[in-house]
Image: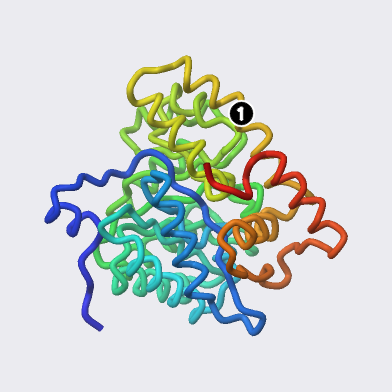
Amino acid sequence: MATTATAAERASESGKKLEFKGVFPANPTPVHADGRINEEALRAIFEENLAHGVNGFWVAGSTGEGPIMNDQQRTTTARIAGETISGKGLSIMHVGAISTDSAMKGARAAKESGCDAICCVPPFFFRASDQMVIDHYKAVVDAADGLPFFVYNLPQLTQVETTPPLMEKIVENVPNVMGLKHSAFNFGDIRVFANMGLKCYSGSGLLPLPALTMGAVGTVDAPLSVAPWHYSELYDAWERGDIETAQRLQDGVVEIVNVVRMFGAPAAVTKLILSERLGIDCGRPIPPVQDLTDEQRPVVLAAARKAGLLQAP
């Protein structure tokens, strides 16, 4: 399969500068009832979020259900990301999977589809040593054939925390490491990673402004997908030094995040909200991901309506 041009290459040709910084929604992945990726709905999410000024996407992350996708689902998602986002934003395709072989297939698909970078959780389920993590990442990065690589630091789900000492080992032994998404609880490590010269995204949609003051290059999280205008305005205010506006918008993220976290089902909640707003069915989560009950769905929609998430401004 021929490799397509990346978004950065296409943007360079058109004079538009795209950088790994800013607002990167961790979007949900729409699926049909039979498990096929809903291509129309996924494109609609990308296009709508881009229209509200996001800088790129963290595709098929945890809210995007990437770790439980099969190889075909992951390949299709990478293709749609490359086709839809290129030239308008940057796509960081998450390829983490239960086996190294499956993650490598995802990395190849990301490269062939024109995604701009890959990211990956460390090996999970089996307790991973530092060497296991490094070997896994080396194989995945090699399969991506030169794409920039972001570590996905999510110890709450993987049981492996990428601490600064482990990150130093990864940088020394794995090529093309550009940065990481830091979703661990030790918020102060953002500053440490930034001082290491890494592009560190905060994984907390609740704390975008504090993360930026700590040296984060931006934010990656599910709430950004349902309120792209809010986070884009906050980041733009930070960029131009308008701290008063940025702080006002920071105060407003609490309600957005609380809606997304309802019933402990962010994938289901974001799919429901975007289905309602876009007028296209984004489906239900891939089992065994937590779904909403029929009684919970109207409660979520009522909260989303109150928070102004069902109609873009």
Q: Quick check: 185 left or right of 137?
A: right
Given the current orientation, which residue lies at the most extreme top position?
A: 244
Q: Nearer the viewer, residue 264 or 199?
A: 264
Q: Nearer the viewer, residue 21 or 162?
A: 21
Tell me the quarter of the picture where residue 80 sits.
bottom left
Residue marked by disc 1 = 252
- Percent of width and height locating residue 41: 52, 69
Residue that appears at 38% across and 30% down: 236
Tell me the quarter of the picture where residue 115 sits.
bottom left
Q: Relative to 143, say whether 199 is above or below.
A: above
Residue that appears at 53% across and 72% down: 99
- Percent of width and height locating residue 104: 41, 72
Residue that appears at 38% across and 50% down: 56
Residue type at mark 1: give it.
Gly
Which colour assignment does the render follow?
Answer: rainbow
Tell me the quarter of the picture where residue 237 sits.
top left
- Percent of width and height locating residue 257: 65, 39
Q: Relative to 308, say whether 40 is above or below.
A: below
Helix, strand, or loop for circle 1? loop
